[in-house]
Image: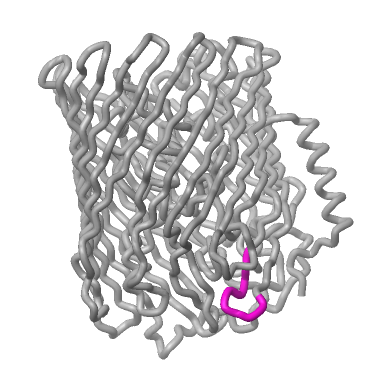
């Protein structure tokens, strides 16, 4: 049975409609603050939490100028009523937020995972205010768990990033920077949609003397998401409401920070997140193995501070503790009334992160800015596979020492060089009888140049080496693990140019990149719908990123982004040359209009080309399958009503329609993606 439900003629007709709409509305995702020269008064108090930045300071921006940085801020979030980080990053250049696995089978939990330039989520460091969020066992982050209630901006750093971030960053770094307490502000956001969908956000911040504070939270629930009406139905999925996609979740967070005069500041933050819901299963399999309900709990404490001993010498530091208590329950059938194995099929994972980061810096004046990084993290994992089983404990620690210098060779030329030493030490290996194994140490580096011959042009070039250590699950898991895995290394190359001539002229950027990866960690499918982790001797990921914007008249912003990605899996036994599930072409076009009387109308079209994957890796005949290309059109309409007495106060009503044409598509084979989603709401800020 063909679950894609489109013959070639129908697909061609739909693609033509999509392209016509794309040309009609003509543009892309880009920062809304480019609409006007004067900043919106309602956004002036949205200060980012400065201690949440790891690398960039006002004194030393070059370490991230030698690579590509994409940023999203609160205006971008509001332009599309984004609720989670997954929403905010769904169409960034070079990135893809997807349910799809890197190899089959995988990502059965239907988490929103990000790839950057072809790298899997295990190669991407996701942080909030510099604190790692990566769950220790799987080494990945479900971006739908990260709510935007108190987020000021999201920085996505691709290519050869700074050595101060440490290992496991070959794909890039995502730092979610929260808002700083300032003048008293409160924000409320209520949304309603189909299938009893309800979402609410509350956020308050303020300042009392030298003490700043923020408080935030969110709650949302839904009976699930709809599938396109083009879907014909299967025994496991008879209707258009996606089976087992219901959920309920809430999120709480807060922070206190205090200024220490002119010398520094201190801050402590904490948060809690809970998710209880289903996991959509295979729509065709008569006896799907992933009849799961999951309950995710996580909470964290994060302390940070900086202190300047002199005008030129100082230190930043951070310490954190992060706990994950996760459960998955497996049921006997799609009625979800009886737990498998006489009620014992409840898998429990209690995992913790504990670490710190110390960053001394020394400003040597016009010529040099020197920084060091000392980073430590311990990962602890406790797993009970089924109720009544014994607990298995796993642990490892990672230590990094790095040194980075920024040299100002000329007024137009800056040079950045950094080197980092990484030590990975396995401590506990659960039931794995051979023991945890030996220590592994590696050396990473970054070298780059920034050249600015004119005020409107910046050019950069950089190269770096990055190490990714295997996760404990990849090594020790009794079903999927492989104790012969070694560390993955990647050589990253990038050149790029940014041009911004001035108002009413098109502006944008072009970046060329290449990643040569040795010992890429992938998957090999085994009989019985399972797999094991294997090592790909060599892989190549290369391509380009293009972003182009234009503001022809004051209230209108047009733009487009395009990513070309060419990958190569060099395993000789492979029938498919490409790495699985990497689309070759991704582009997004968008138009934004914002009137002087508060009306905003935004439209976006996003296209992803076909994705190939090799299904049977051990069969004599290896099957190459294809997921069809897709184009999704979104619309956002809003009307803001400001209060006359204060420009900071306003009420806004909005309507969002995602996937306007109700396009049917799959990111993960035989698991339908959402069809048309309609949400309306009201938000207020005062």
Task: Residue 255: name its quadrant.
Answer: top left
* Residue 247 horizontal side relative to residue 141, left or right: right
User: Which secondary structure is most common in the magenta stretch?
Assistant: loop
| Res 334 visible | no
Residue situated in front as seen by the camera: 553 or 103: 103
Residue most toward the front?
572
Instruction: Tell me the residue at 66%/37% (across/down).
Output: 588
- 261 vs 155: above or below: above
Coordinates of residue 551 in the picture (x, y in percent) = 66, 17
The image shows residue 618, relative to residue 169, as above or below, that is: below
In the rendered view of the protein, which quadrant contains the N terminus? bottom right
Measured from the top left, where is residue 575 in percent x and y? Answer: 64, 67
Task: Residue at 20%, 16% (x, y): give it.
Answer: 364
- Depth check: give the residue in front, 50 or 372: 372
Taking the image as shown, residue 531 lies to the left or right of residue 638, namely: left
Instruction: Inspect this view and state whether residue 69 appears.
Output: yes
Task: Tell me where residue 98 appears, x and y as whole percent.
Answer: 56, 54
Q: How many marks?
A: 0
The residue at the point 61 percent across, 19 percent down is 507
The answer to whether residue 476 is left or right of residue 309 is right
Q: Which residues are magenta?
A: 613-621
Residue 617 lies within the magenta run: yes
Task: Name which residue lies at 40% across and 86% down.
Answer: 343
Q: Is residue 420 above or below residue 414?
A: below
Picture quadrant of residue 207: top left
Residue 256: x %, y % from top left: 23, 34
């Amino acid at each position: 049975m063909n679950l894609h439900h489109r013959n070639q003629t129908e697909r061609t007709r739909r693609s033509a409609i999509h392209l016509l709409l794309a040309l009609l509305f003509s543009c892309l995702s880009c920062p809304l603050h480019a609409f006007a020269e004067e900043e919106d008064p309602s956004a002036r108090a949205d200060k980012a939490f400065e201690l949440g930045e790891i690398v960039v300071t006002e004194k030393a921006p070059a370490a991230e100028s030698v690579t590509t940085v994409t940023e999203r801020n609160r205006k971008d979030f509001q332009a599309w009523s984004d609720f989670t980080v997954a929403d905010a990053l769904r169409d960034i250049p070079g990135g893809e937020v997807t349910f799809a696995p890197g190899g089959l089978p995988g990502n059965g939990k239907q988490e929103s995972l990000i790839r950057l330039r072809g790298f899997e989520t295990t190669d991407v460091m996701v942080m909030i205010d510099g604190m790692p969020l990566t769950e220790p066992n799987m080494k990945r982050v479900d971006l739908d768990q990260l709510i935007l209630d108190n987020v000021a901006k999201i920085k996505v750093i691709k290519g050869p990033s700074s050595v101060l971030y440490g290992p496991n960053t070959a794909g890039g770094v995502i730092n979610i920077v929260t808002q700083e307490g300032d003048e008293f502000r409160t924000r409320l956001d209520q949304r309603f949609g189909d299938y009893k969908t309800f979402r609410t956000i509350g956020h308050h911040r303020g300042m009392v003397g030298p003490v700043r504070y923020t408080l935030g939270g969110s709650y949302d629930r839904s009976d699930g998401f709809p599938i396109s009406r083009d879907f014909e139905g299967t025994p496991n999925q008879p209707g258009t409401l996606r089976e087992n996609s219901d959920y309920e979740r809430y999120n709480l967070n807060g922070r206190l920070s205090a200024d220490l005069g002119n010398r520094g500041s201190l801050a402590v933050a904490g948060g809690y997140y809970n998710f209880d819901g289903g996991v959509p299963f295979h729509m065709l399999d008569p006896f799907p193995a992933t009849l799961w309900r999951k309950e995710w709990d996580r909470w964290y404490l994060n302390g940070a501070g900086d202190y300047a001993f002199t005008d030129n010498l100082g230190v930043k530091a951070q310490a954190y503790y992060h706990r994950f208590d996760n459960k998955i329950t497996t049921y006997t059938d799609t009625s979800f009334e009886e737990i498998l194995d006489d009620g014992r099929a409840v898998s429990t994972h209690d995992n913790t992160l504990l670490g710190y980061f110390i960053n001394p810096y020394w400003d040597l004046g016009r010529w040099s800015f020197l920084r060091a990084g000392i980073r430590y993290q311990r990962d602890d994992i406790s797993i009970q596979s089924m109720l009544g089983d014994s607990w298995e404990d796993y642990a490892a620690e990672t230590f990094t020492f790095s040194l980075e210098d920024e040299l100002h060779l000329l007024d137009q030329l800056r040079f950045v060089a950094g080197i980092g030493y990484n030590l990975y030490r396995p401590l506990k290996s659960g039931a794995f009888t051979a023991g945890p194994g030996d220590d592994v140490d590696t050396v990473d580096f970054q070298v780059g140049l920034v050249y600015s011959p004119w005020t409107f042009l910046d050019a950069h070039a950089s190269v770096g080496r990055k190490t990714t250590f295997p996760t404990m699950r990849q090594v020790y898991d009794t079903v999927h693990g492989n104790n012969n895995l070694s560390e993955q290394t990647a050589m990253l190359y990038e050149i790029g140019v940014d041009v911004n001539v001035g108002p009413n002229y098109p502006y944008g950027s072009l970046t060329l990149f290449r990643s040569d990866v040795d010992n890429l960690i992938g998957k090999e499918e085994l009989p019985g719908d399972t797999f094991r982790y294997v090592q790909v001797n060599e892989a190549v990921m290369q391509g380009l990123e293009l972003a182009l914007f234009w503001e022809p008249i004051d209230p209108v912003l047009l733009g487009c982004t395009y990513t070309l990605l060419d990958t190569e899996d060099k395993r000789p036994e492979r029938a498919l040359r490409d790495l699985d599930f990497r689309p070759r072409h991704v582009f997004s076009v968008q138009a934004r209009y914002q009137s002087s009387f508060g009306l905003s109308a935004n439209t976006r079209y996003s296209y992803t080309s076909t994705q190939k994957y090799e299904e049977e890796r051990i069969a004599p005949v290896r099957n190459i399958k294809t997921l069809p290309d897709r184009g999704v059109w979104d619309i956002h309409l809003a009307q803001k009503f400001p209060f006359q007495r204060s420009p900071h106060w306003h009420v806004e009503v909005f309507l969002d329609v995602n996937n306007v044409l109700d396009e049917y598509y799959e990111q993960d084979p035989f698991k339908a993606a959402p069809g048309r989603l309609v949400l309306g709401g009201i938000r207020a800020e005062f």
